Image: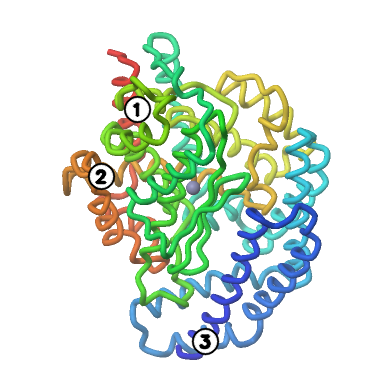
Amino acid sequence: MQELRRLEKKLYALQYAQNVIEYDDATVAPPESYEGRGEAVAELSAFEHALMTGETLPRLLEEVKKEPLSEQEAAEVEELSRRYRRISCVPAEEYAEFSRLTTRAMSAWEKAKAASDFSLYQPYLEKIVAARRRFAALLDPDKAPYDVLLDQFEPGLTMETCDRFFGELREVITPLIRRITEEGKKPDTSFLRGPWSLAGQRKLSDRVMEVMGIDRAHCTIGESEHPFTTEFYKGDVRITTHYFEEDMASSFYSVVHEGGHALYELHIADRLMGTCLAGGVSMGLHESQSRLYENNIGRSLPFVRAVFPSIQEIFPEQLSGVTAEEFYKAVNVAEPSLIRTEADEVTYCLHIMVRYELEKQLIAGTLAVGDIPAEWNRLMKEYLGVEVPCDRVGCLQDVHWCSGDFGYFPSYALGTAYAAQIADAMRRDFDLDAAVERGELSAVSSWLAEKIWQYGKEKSPAWLIKNACGAPFDPHYYTDYLVKKYSEIYELD
Ligand code: ZN
């Protein structure tokens, strides 16, 4: 076990280095610098691959099974065995080549998006889809390749579960959107137009992180094209945001969202540091924490009441005469739109469903990469009723496919639904609204740290949901929450 721990330390160092490079790439690296960075990342990946597939790891994994193991040690062995299976099925050269490919794809995507020209990105995406299909078949030739990919982001998730889950959501969300559009009393959003100074928005980010109880000695905020969170280790977590002069709510809620991810990473138990269990357990569960802060807390009236005085103090001209209640309604407007990251709570999952349908077909081989723009536009029309004017605000809007992250998007919807159930469980333990309205978010973070955060990857997502909620996952908490909240805001009876 001691020898295995030394190997885990090396993996930790490699991951640390790769995360630093990735963070640098997305924030401050000069635009024409990907060539050298790609080479460095490829070398690090090759080194990691050699470490994971060399004779040491499989030998140790076999040997430690004969030792008496603590619960944590057994979880480490299981996690490493899972990673070993995943990585050892891909030949080293192919693995390094894939890493070089994704770095180049990222740069191609940035240019394609800026020019709204899918053809600049298409050749890279074709190679990425082919590689992902091949890797999935190597890992488990008996399973549908997309099921293999889903399981990597959310252990146990399958197309069958997704189809049922999305079906249930659509049954509630589609009529709710129709009622909102046809009968709803639309909140006034005129005061949100801005302009909002970037200096003011940066000040607001600091204030939001303070209210959330994020320790700035261990977490910084940067700026990137697409907001994200990365952790080097639990003592150094980075979040990013993107400021828009015409839309203050965008960055405001990005910071609340990424702050939720950051809090999770900052509260992993010390005993897991340097081991393969340090870090959030799955994409779905990670997203449940960010969504919980962003939606169930951040877009609630008590939270808006807690922070609105600060927002008004920073932007006195834009918000003079506006009340917290009016601001709350304005940031909760539900309207079918083009951009996923800007979507409201009601239409959000429909954006995910568009990506899910496309990914399912791409990985099954029934949709060609070149047909993505047309199919994207068709599904956006069918699910959300919107016309996509150009690929920049259509199929080029998300970064995820650059890294080959197919099967990732469904975990966003799943996490959003987990969040509603977790918030409901929290309400049974303490007066959530009262604590939030007083700005006492420490009640929230200590509850989550105890039930979920501390465990890192030691426990499965299903175990953590049951531990926090006292019952297995049930999407009804989410659909009930949406119907109740939006019926009030839009005054539907
Ligand atoms: Zn997120």
**Which class describes the residues within 10 Å of circle 1: few (<14), some (14-19), or many (20+)?**
many
State how the image is colored.
rainbow
Q: Quadrant of the N terminus?
A: bottom left
Horizontally, is 272 left or right of 151 in the view?
left
Of all residues, the one furthest to the top in this rendering is 183
The x, y position of residue 106, in whole percent, is 72, 51
Query: Which residue shows up at 25% across the image and 55% down it?
Result: 447
Disc 2 + disc 3, Cβ < 8 Å: no
Query: Which residue shows up at 41% across the image and 60% down it?
Result: 216
- Residue pointed to by mark 2: 439
Residue 300 versus residue 475: which sits nearer the camera? 300
The label number, if any, that marks residue 328 in the structure image: 1
- Residue pointed to by mark 3: 6
Is residue 352 in sight in this rendering? no
The earlier-in-sequence mark between 1 and 2 is: 1
Horizontally, is 169 left or right of 21 in the view?
left
